[in-house]
Image (cartoon, rainbow, N blue to C red):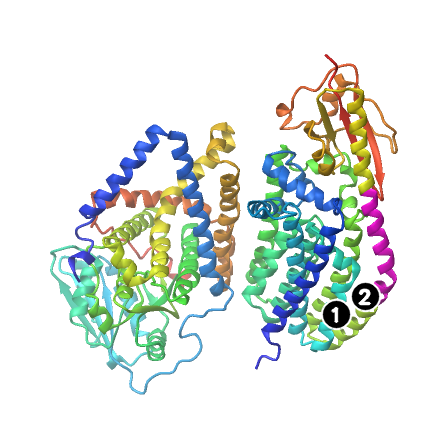
Amino acid sequence: MNSFPRWENRFVFLLACFFLLYWARHLLLQSNCLCPEVIVRTGLASDLWAEEIRGRQGLICSFWWPPLMTLLSLTFFALHFPFRIFLPAHLISVFSGGLTAFFINRLAQKQKVPPFFRWIFVSGLLVHPWVRHLFSTGTDYAVFLMLCSGTVFGLVCWMKEKKIRYFLLLNIFSGLALLCHPAGLLLVAAVLITVIIFSLVKEKDSQARQATILLYLTPVLYAAALWLLGNWVIMKDSLYFLRWVNGKTFFQNIFLTPGVCSDYFPGVTLLVAVYLSTMILAGWRNQKKIFCFFFWVIFFLVLTSTVFVFRHASQMTKENQQNWEKTFQEIVEDINFVRRLTPGREMYVVEFSGYLFRYAWGNNPGITHVFDLARAKIPVSPQPAYILIPSEKIRTFLPRDPFFHRYPDLPGYPPDFLLGEITSGSLTLFRLLILPPKN
Amino acid sequence: MTPEESAFSGITRAQKGWCFAATGIFVYLLWHYPLNTILMVNLFITLFYLSFTVYKVILIWPVSSERANSVGKKQLLLPEKLPIYTILVPLYREENLVRDITSALNNLDYPIECLDIKLLLEEDDYQTVEEVKKINPGSAYQVIILPPKGPRTKPKACNEGLKQAKGKYLVIYDAEDRPEPDQLKKAVAAFSLAPATVGCLQAKLNFYNSRQNLLTAWFSSEYSLWFDLYLPGLANFSAPVPLGGTSNHFRIQALREVGGWDPYNVAEDCDLGYRLYRHGWHTRILDSTTWEEASSHLSDWWRQRSRWVKGYLQTYLVHLRQPVKLLRELGFINTCHFHFTVGGLLFCLLINPVYWFLTFFWIVTRSQLLSYFFPRPVFLLSAFCLFIGNFIFVYSCALAVFRRHDNHLVKQALLIPPYWLLMSLASWKGYWQFFFRPHHWEKTRHGFFNREAVQ
């Protein structure tokens, strides 16, 4: 008899979705600016559709995120649904949150953890402010964490039961995780080591060992190859992200730099990772005692961090929102200021920060062109004020860009360029306003 | 069997009329709106690829994830008295394999007195006849000599065997087959457990010489995917199953009711699978393997594959002679299964080289012309089919051999795309032959495997 009914997992999934949906709604209605990272990522989708700045999809390694977003956005666009740009992103996150809860609960079921403990843990995880915020905000972090949970779920179940379906889940989710976020490299490395060790211990036939490892690596390597191929097709350079303005610290930025939403990312990743690692340990030895011990340790950590961090996290979120609103306002003011100085002139915004101020320039219809200078080799000191760039040198600053021929000729001398830096929270942004010369 | 069910008459007048009308409309549109017409055709093909990919995933997922099993997997509940089992073995110019097949049949774990084995020989095939006489296989064997007239095909020989069959059940084996010893018992047990409407059990086919060369390894991977994942997937949905060439176990009543095999169809097995379903008989997959010899020479493989494609085309057109009747007999869902399994496969083989060429052409030239035919949505869908769809098919092949514990084939299975190219090229020959030599049976030669290695 199945002592763990399937309805329980579905119930957990639906409960998590409803809970996160409530917070997503709250975030959507909270501010016009929304979370800036949502804007960036929805921007990615729109850019991809409009064939603008397509390289950004490779920049953050969210290879399949933009097409998915675009398709959903189009659906909502057709329905004339309010918040149609941002809603798909939030819904994907909420769905991912629900699936994460599902995987965690299902894994606990497989480990024969008593219902009381697993319910407490799933509930504790979901109400944690970091987790809650991450899974109700429209970024690909939520999807990534869902894929991590699914991967570990597949791994543990495969190790316990040796069923092909879990092996498939493990392989496919690992590949997708790698396509979703560079941190997927860490996940793949950890899982690969586990698979190798497990195969060495359990498989006596060397061909079976090789086949297992090969079948695991194939989707992962294929995913990596797709990403590199995508970069090559779009940017003519598979490894261009390493030659980006922040290229030297690309991986440090990805894993360590605190952002806005990504403030929560390392914390949540750590929580989920520790929990899932415990599951692996318990699954390996099939010992409930190990799980129960680690369960209480983690539960204590979650509880204390929730109590201590909640206030700080809420405050930080609020400050970040305010900073971003202020930033957008400053940009709008800057543009209006320059426009007043030079009435009737066409205006370009060149942006190379990695963050596109869609909100800002979307409210200034006079701006007709947006340039991607993300890879520009402009020597910027750590904290510059406004600086001027001679127009005749603008092309030398621009990197090799496959879409360069599509850009209109940049204006000539005298220099009407403004490069600005705005610091918002822990994030530094640059912008460049270019004005064509007077006739 | 009625003339409408036979491939003897080839394409009917009505079908020719439809073909000419469709071609005429296409040429007219191409003449007047060339770019838009090509764009629409491209969109249609892309949507077809997408749906074909999704369809195959839906079919094979429950099987690959072990949610659906073939019959005969677990228990072997046999009736007290085993019924007479007829075994048909058509032989033609296979004197070198007579000893192998009789040995394999003698190894079957089934009471010899309950076996009715018929060796079907052609009168003018003196060597094989002589070899059979020399071996003198035993009392369970009956040799039937067929006169050299009419179509010289395997189904014709099988029909002669069916006329004289004494068993309750019947199975066909080829000369190079080596069925698992308990296959007949498994089939009897499965028939006794299955509903009375199950008229056929298809055993899984695979190759004993998969290690011989790259071609046999690829062929083996393809068979693992087809017989271990795809056909069980179809059976899992209670859909009609295109039978494999051998190891089809029939209730003889079902076989006689549908009129046996079509002697003019060169893929009579595929045709019979659908004809059985149209007459109300279902097919299930038997969890037992018959080991065969894969064509190890490209020329043999080429002939065999082109014959299969030609036969599939014959089958497709025969069953589409009365599409409304087909829809009524199969139902909407099963008609879709039929179109995807037979028509979809044929269309894929036909069109694949064109799209591979377009991809290659774009990589080399980066022609802007192609960008017109691939606007953004079509491009995204095409890219999905190219990168994800093809990967799914490759990975399914590798997974199929992995499930079978043929771990040595995983590497070759992951490199299978060149094999698809060979399949497409062979299929073009099949299409050509359909028009000019529709009933010609290209005999596959066997007996080229390394016996010591296989042992």
Q: Is residue A257 visible?
A: no
Q: The N terminus of chain B is located in which quarter? A: bottom left
Q: Is residue A385 above or below residue B112?
A: above
Q: Position of residue A395 (x, y in %)?
A: 72, 21
Q: Is mark 1 in CB contact (under 8 Å) with mark 2?
A: yes
Pick the front one: B89 or B20: B20
Tell me the chain of label 1: A
- Is residue A151 shown left or right of residue B188? right
Q: Is residue A166 magenta?
A: no
Q: Position of residue A339 (x, y in %)?
A: 77, 24
Pick the front one: B252 or A368: A368
Kind of residue sitting beneath label 2 = Val
Q: Residue at x 68, y 50 (%)?
A: A140
Secondary element under disc 2, as helix, strand or loop, is helix
Tell me the chain of label 2: A
**Image quadrant where residue A424 sits:** top right
> Could you classify mark 2 by the number of other residues whose Cα lies within 10 Å: few (under 14), some (14-19), or many (20 or more)?
some
Q: Is residue B310 above or below residue A367?
A: below
Kind of residue sitting beneath label 1 = Phe
Q: Which residues are magenta?
A: A303-324
Q: Is residue A347 above or below residue A184?
A: above
- Is residue A261 shown left or right of residue A16? right
Q: Residue at x 62, y 28 (%)?
A: A402
Pick the front one: A22 or B239: A22
Q: Position of residue B163 (x, y in %)?
A: 16, 69
**Overall secondary structure of the magenta section:** helix
Residue labelled with disc 2: A302
Residue labelled with disc 1: A121
User: Tag 2 or tag 1, which sits nearer the N-term?
Assistant: 1
- Is residue B62 shown left or right of residue A396? left
